[in-house]
Amino acid sequence: MERLQQELLKSDQDIPFRSTKRHTHHTWAQTFISRPELYLQPRSLEELQKIVNLARKCRRRLVVVGSAHSPSDLTCSSSWLINLDDYNQVLKVDKNKKTLLVQAGIRLKDLNKEANKHGLTMPNLGSINDQSIAGAISTGTHGSSLQHGLLSESVRSIRILLANGQAVRCSASQNEDLFRAALLSLGALGIIVEVEFEMADACNIEWEQTLAPLNQILDTWNTTLWTRKEYTRVWWMPYMKRAIVWSAERTNAPERPPPSSWYGGSLGFHIYHNLLFVSNYLPFTLQWIEWFVFGMQYGFKTGTTTSAIQPLQTGLLMDCLFSQFVNEWAIPISKGPEALRRLSAWMHGEKDSGIPFSAKGLYVHCPIEVRVSDTSKSSRPRPYLDITSKDEPTLYLNATLYRPYLQDPPCRWRYYEAFEWLMKDLGGRPHWAKNFSYTSRDQISGMYKQTMPEFMKIRNECDPEGMFLEDGTIGICLSMMKSNSHCKSEKCRDEKQ
């Protein structure tokens, strides 16, 4: 520490070094906690360069964090943690190209707010808009539409600060290999400082959601389910064998507010939260909780439909409610019906699931979120670490487990072990920033046989000393890539204390 203080006194005295030693960092869901040596909030590129140069001299690792909405330990560090919330300006608006050049710390909600001033909006969103633009693209964030791929498909260029202190711009026509690595980098290449993002014309969307039997979902899978409207997502309730189908398309019609949300209100929120807490001790009640809570929210009879018209940038969002673990995988869309049937059979104790783990006495939370994207027809550069299917549309299955009052559910390990086994059996890949727990480094390396060597080559050229390999499981995975279980260690099973 004495050497660090000396370096700080000597280096670029006119450039601020905004830091504190008294910061405790935790993920949004409080699934992981870390206490960084320094917590930094720079406001300029010069400040960022000073941080990188000092970290290199002092042999410190750097991790960049935005909203920390990832439930994994991706943003945790015991070294230096950089938050870019004060590095969030719009630098240029090009109405002809419909692009905004922004500093990387801007949150998606603020990016849309600024874009709306010019009649523009982001064409696609995930479930929330609290992430920074850099964090959203660096973790492979996606929405749910066969007309869209990852959010990074709309990125036209990136400027990234490397370990040598140089800020380099890359795009499809300039440093393409670096661009493909930076489009989904997990923060392992350097610090993204600027993003040029392509927008769409601002508009409203009209959405409707309908309670439907699972058989109807499966029967329309290859016909109208995913193609009837531009945006579609499904929330599957496994114990009732039903699902909510939410779909939306653009419209010129005026806004029409959505109906009141039962668990979006204070009473419903706290009833649901307390019922989940009770289920930690009486797991069999989850099937009845599913019936009651989602009946109150969406209706008790199949065919019940609600609708609304909202601006695109808010209509696509949803409330994440409580602290949660999220285990999400991408599989080919053609494998979707098999995945749902086998997972349903396993949960109900039927013998034809083919999953080699017992579900006896196991009850899980719902809903299981089902979403889609399509990158197979895109002519734009694909990220090296892209989890999507190359030859057909992609299906995302999201197994969420809530943590009522920050208490882990008892089903977590057995459920996730079976879920991941099935996903791997169907040729899936885990979402990098979620809680996958039973997938080894060898298995991950095998999923990216063609592209992982290219990504690692570029990563090692950009950061030969591993300054940007964070302390968490993803950093360890990228730095070692050998046959140890990804998350079976005690470090990964428990919160970082």
Image (spheres, rainbow, N blue to C red):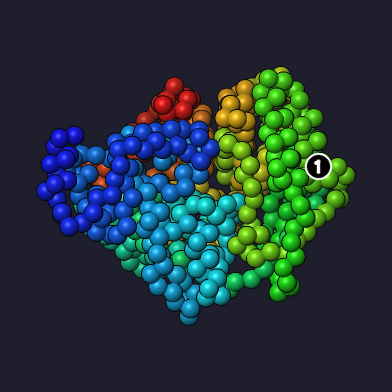
**Closer to us: 267 or 48:** 267
**Closer to us: 376 or 241:** 241
**Relative to 98, is 295 on the left or the right?**
right
Q: Residue at x 81, y 41 (%)?
A: 295
**Relative to 327, is 193 on the left or the right?**
left
Q: Quadrant of the N terminus?
A: top left
- Where does the image place residue 422, in percent across and percent down from the top left? 61, 33
- Vertical arrangement, residue 283 with respect to residue 202, above or below: above
Q: Residue at x 83, y 54 (%)?
A: 305
Q: Quadrant of residue 224?
A: bottom right
- Vertical arrangement, residue 56 with respect to residue 155, above or below: above
- What's the amino acid at mark 1? Met
Q: Quadrant of the C terminus?
A: top left
**Relative to 388, is 301 on the left or the right?**
right
- Where does the image place residue 469, in percent across and percent down from the top left? 32, 40
- Where does the image place residue 68, in percent across and percent down from the top left? 46, 44
Label 1 sits on a secondary structure element that is helix
Q: Which residue is mark 1?
A: 296
- Vertical arrangement, residue 163 with respect to residue 78, above or below: below
Residue 150 visible in this rendered orientation of the protein: yes
Q: Residue at x 74, y 40 (%)?
A: 268
**Relative to 154, is 78 on the left or the right?**
left
Residue 172 visible in this rendered orientation of the protein: no
**Closer to us: 195 or 488:** 195
Q: Residues within 10 Å of mark 1 (few under 14, many from 20)?
A: some
- Vertical arrangement, residue 491 with respect to residue 211, above or below: above
- Where does the image place residue 304, in percent across and percent down from the top left? 85, 50
